[in-house]
Image (cartoon, rainbow, N blue to C red):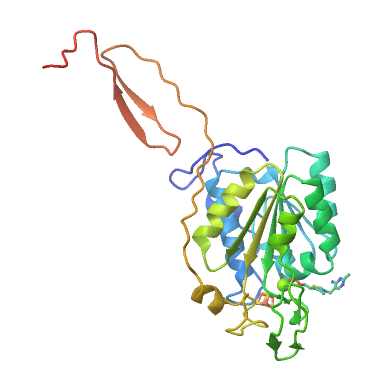
Amino acid sequence: MTTTPTKPMGGLNLVGLGKAEYKGAPSTLCNGCGHDSIASQIIAVAYELSLEPHRIAKFSGIGCSSKSPAYFLGRSHSINGLHGRMPSLATGALTVNRSLIGLGVSGDGDTGSIGFGQFKHMLRRNVDMVYIIENNGVYGLTKGQFSATADVGQELKYAGKNELPPIDLCLEAIASGAGFVARSFAGDPKQVQQLLKAAISYHGTAVLDIISPCVTFNTSDLSTKGYNWGKDHEEALHEVRYVMPAEEIMVEYDEGEVKDVIMHDGSTILLRKLDKDYEPRD
Ligand SMILES: Cc1ncc(C[n+]2csc(CCOP(=O)(O)OP(=O)(O)O)c2C)c(N)n1
Ligand code: SF4
Ligand SMILES: [Mg+2]
């Protein structure tokens, strides 16, 4: 993926679009669903990076998470595929059109259960795309069965007790050779934004496993995919910041001249070159 280093100024960004133009349809997900928070961060990042909507292709499978691309980047290309089969759609589309910025949105069920084989092969091929897993430990859309990332021993009202150990999707990505793997939490929008920016700039598959609480079917304080667990265990190890690559700024001006230089973020610095008669001891 290649991106133009940009920063919006005023209401419009450097491709002349306002933030509203990166939105999608109104969400039909439950109020407070982590997936909606991630959608908001995707909108903010695409606007801030001044991405052109027609260069973005969204891919998803089936699940509440996979529905969510309808709620962001409404002017971009989008395909909502079959359950677990998003990686092969993305592989095909991004292989024939190398100029697209690929953005895959999946769930822990879509990726870790039915789509696990597809996920591994996409990683093996290092398809140039951002692959987001909105990880809530359950099948939200089909009303809360345990997914392959659910905690062993966890109990849910309707699903009973989960007897099986979880699959760690970050470990699986690393084991498959992925060069960009990060885990974040939908309740930490700033970190999600920085990671999204870095992932979009990465060449190859960038895996973002974002814990995204299901506020309807996985609300237990003991669930490692729940909002309370995320907040209670939030320990900042470091503040992640993404610095966009940018063209070197070159200026030429004469001795004694003062020059306004516009920086990549729109700010200006004033340079004055000393002239020949300058007396440093004065
Ligand atoms: C082939 C196939 N099998 C099963 C289903 C039923 N189904 C729909 S969504 C889903 C699980 C979605 O879970 P996840 O990917 O974690 O998304 P979430 O809803 O939690 O965001 C299942 C099993 C289906 N649509 N297609
Ligand atoms: S069921 Fe869960 S995952 Fe689905 S929209 Fe509601 S809160 Fe989100
Ligand atoms: Mg899920």
* Front residue of this view, candidates 280 and 65: 280
The image position of residue 172, as x and y in percent, is 74, 60
Specify whether 91 is left or right of 269.
Answer: right
The image position of residue 56, as x and y in percent, is 69, 47
List the single residue furthest toward the top.
276
Residue 127 visible somewhere in the drawing = yes
Q: Quadrant of ligand 2?
A: bottom right
- Vertical comparison of 191 with 138: above or below: above
The image position of residue 273, as x and y in percent, is 28, 17
Specify whether 115 is left or right of 99.
Answer: right
The image position of residue 190, as x and y in percent, is 49, 59
- Vertical comparison of 49 with 175: above or below: above
Q: Quadrant of residue 146?
A: bottom right
* Front residue of this view, candidates 218 and 71: 218
The C terminus - image quarter:
top left
Residue 86 visible somewhere in the drawing = no
Task: Look at 76% across and 38% down and name the residue there.
Answer: 98
**How many numbered marks have been drawn onto this rendered protein structure?**
0
Specify whether 215 is left or right of 138.
Answer: left
- Vertical comparison of 165 with 257: above or below: below
Q: Quadrant of residue 140?
A: bottom right
Task: Look at 72% across and 72% down and name the residue there.
Answer: 149
Specify whether 162 is left or right of 214.
Answer: right
* Front residue of this view, candidates 32 and 224: 224
The N terminus - image quarter:
top right
- Vertical comparison of 15 with 257: above or below: below
Task: Look at 85% across and 46% down and name the residue there.
Answer: 92
List the single residue furthest toward the left.
282
